[in-house]
Amino acid sequence: MLGSTNHERNLYGENWNTVYGGYFSDPSSALPLVRAILEAAGETGAAAIADMGGGTGFLMSEVGREAGPGFGPRLVCVDAAQEQLDDCPDEVIAIRSTVEAVERPMLVEGGQTLLLCMRSLLHYFGREGLAPELAHLRSVLLRGERMVHQTICFEDPDDQAPANLLYERMGTGKWYPLVGELASALEAAGLNVVAMEPAKSLPLESAELEARYGIAHEDMEAIGRELADRWPGPSRVIVPQETGFTTNLDYMVMTCLAC
């Protein structure tokens, strides 16, 4: 995953909450995930909620704010980038680690109950890395505990294909599954999907992608032409603009039970 995150390091710190129109610091965009986390925490009596790849701690801060005063579980943000963790609010416990290296004792004590969550993380591991990472996350949980995540995935293969070609051409290593593919991968890892709800799609301008991934403008124009040639009809995922194009990435919030 580290190779993928190197693309984003120029955006870390205070800038992170402003990228992509502020999507990742917008309480309304986070609300479906926040509510799913709170529901799972209530069902399991979680002593700690740990956000994998949690960046600046925004999601955990929103969980605490939505729950209100007296909320019991410890709120933990795990991230590999100290620049991100430095911006975590005081009420969030910051742990510096890659997701791949996280172990249960880092997050919860003794027989206490743990809840894992994550937002926009799993695609970083690529198509081949998804199953091993899900197996690792399952190993952190005890049977009966929950994992709640918001992940980019598509219901229609005709939406999935152009999004994956775009990210392949940009050399990101990321991969976006179909909803059914993701659910099957989770269940193969021992994480059965017990609830599912769409979240607000993420619109990305091609100029933003150029800046994030260091793509030359002429190269992005060539990618845009290839996408238009391959999928010439109306597309909800790749939308041509006067300058460049907009990519719309679909999210699904899934609550999983460790079996």
Image: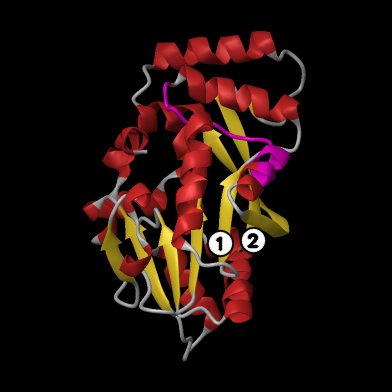
Q: Residue 162: x percent and y percent?
A: 63, 22
Residue nearer the viewer, 87 or 257? 257
User: Magenta residues?
Assistant: 171-184
Distance from the alpha carbon under mark 1 to that under mark 2? 6 Å
Residue nearer the viewer, 249 or 156? 156
- Residue 170 in view here: yes
Few, some or many residues within 10 Å of mark 2 (<14, 14–19, 20+): many
User: Residue shown at 56%/56% (left/top)?
Assistant: 149
Residue 33 disc label? none
Q: Three-letter amino acid code at disc 1?
A: Met
- 220 is within the stretch colored magenta: no
Q: Three-letter amino acid code at disc 2?
A: Thr
Residue receiving disc 1 = 147
Q: How many marks?
A: 2
Left or right: residue 195 versus residue 247 is right
**Label 2: element kind:** strand
User: Residue shown at 50%/25% (left/top)?
Assistant: 167
Few, some or many residues within 10 Å of mark 1 (<14, 14–19, 20+): many
Residue 255 disc label? 2
- Residue 244 in view here: no
Q: Residue 160: x percent and y percent?
A: 67, 29
User: Residue shown at 48%/86% (left/top)?
Assistant: 71
**Label 1: element kind:** strand
Q: Are marks 1 and 2 in contact (CB under 8 Å)?
A: yes
Q: Residue 93: x percent and y percent?
A: 31, 72
Between discs 1 and 2, the one toward the N terminus: 1
Q: The N terminus is located in which quarter?
A: top left
- 180 is within the stretch colored magenta: yes
User: Residue shown at 67%/10% (left/top)?
Assistant: 230
